[in-house]
Image (cartoon, helix red, strand yellow):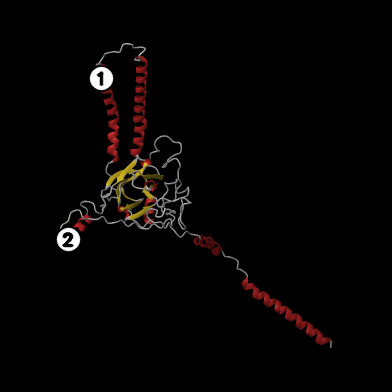
Amino acid sequence: MRMPIRMKTLAIAAGLGCAALSVAATAAPVAAPKPTPQTSAQAPAAKATSTAPTTSPLLAQDGAPATTIDPHVGQPIDGRIGLQPQVTKNGKFAHWMHNGVLLPVITAICILVLLLLAWVVVRFRRAANPVASKTSHNTLVEVLWTLGPVVVLVAIAVPSIGLLQAQFKPAPAGAVTLKAIGNQWYWTYQYPDHGGIEITANMLKEKDQVAPGERARTDADGPRLLAVDNRIVLPVGVPIRLITTSNDVIHSWAIPAFWMKLDAVPGRLNETSFTIEKPGLYFGQCSELCGARHAFMPIAVQAVSPAQFAAWVAAKGGKMPGAAAPSSAVIPQPGAEGSAVEAAQANAAEAVTGPAANEAAPTPSSPSAQGATGNPAGPGNAGH
């Protein structure tokens, strides 16, 4: 009887040992294999790919390259007396003329008149002159008060005429053409030389004014009443050919830091040129009374390097013109006298109803959607 019991015990032990070996063999494939050098090198790349941005890094939320706002350049400065720091050649010349010519002349004239009044009050008072003088002419005084103002006016006129001429100097070949179109109450911009890029810029509302789904203004966008949802981008050191017009009433495109103010008149194209010398963000406003929301038509210009500008144009779907291409793009103005649109409309009307004068109607502009802010309000801050 003892022998079978021993064999039974050995059989049970052998069975338990086989079960343990089976469990170990089953668990071995589940354990993670030791990474090879190749797998370790590929891991960071896979992680970087998974966190890569889905949008172009050249476009910030407002559609322009990301930048940091300098609170002392390109915008009103709290407590400052005088003009904003200028970043164009004409602006610097005008700033010098204001501080170096006009201000000293005005100060000298005011002091001179004040001293003359004080001298007259003291010298010719009734107590000192009981008998009034009967002198009617003084040749020396008449010559002085005639020649003095003439000299002062000539001293002011010479630099003034030079500045006026420089402000309306035509843009050279290779300039970047920017067409600014005023609307009630927002701005539309076109880049005719860069593939017809079109941008609509509305003022950003404050947090307590936005509707659900709209983006409110932040300090990174700019000051209150000056920040826009889509900034325009211009290159530094490259001449800018600015053309203004309007779709409704007279507006005015003004950037104080550029020494720039050009009216936008319906049915007319006004043109000027300037060159930005310093990168940064510059703010302005419509400077012509244009209706109830005139105070809510801000302008924001972001000046970047030519390389950044070319990258921004490409990200916007445009293209850079040839290096030697002159800035002579034809800027159509719907309904303007002599325009192709006006001629085509007149011919069509004449074919149907006979000759008619001044029957052409302006073709409404159709700004393209930006999609940079997600603001559903559309042009003009509808519902603001």
Report the quarter where the N terminus lies: bottom right
- In which quarter of the view is residue 166 placed? top left
- In which quarter of the view is residue 345 placed? bottom left
Q: Mark on residue 353?
A: 2
Front-lying residue, 255 or 133: 133
| Left or right of residue 340, residue 306 in this image | right
Q: Judging from the image, what secondary structure is the residue with disc 1 in?
A: helix
Residue sitting at x 76%, y 83%: 11
Badge nearest the viewer, 1 or 2 = 2
Residue sitting at x 34%, y 27%: 105
Residue 246 screen position, x and y as percent: 30, 50
Q: Is residue 350 visible?
A: yes
Give the mark nearer the N terminus: 1 vs 2.
1
Q: Mark on residue 142?
A: 1
| Left or right of residue 351, residue 213 in this image | right
Please tell me how crowded label 1 is: few (under 14), some (14-19), or many (20+) other residues with Cα within 10 Å: few
Disc 1/disc 2 C-alpha distance (Å): 70 Å
* Amino acid type indicated by mark 2: Thr
Front-lying residue, 165 or 193: 165
Q: Are marks 1 and 2 in contact (CB under 8 Å)?
A: no
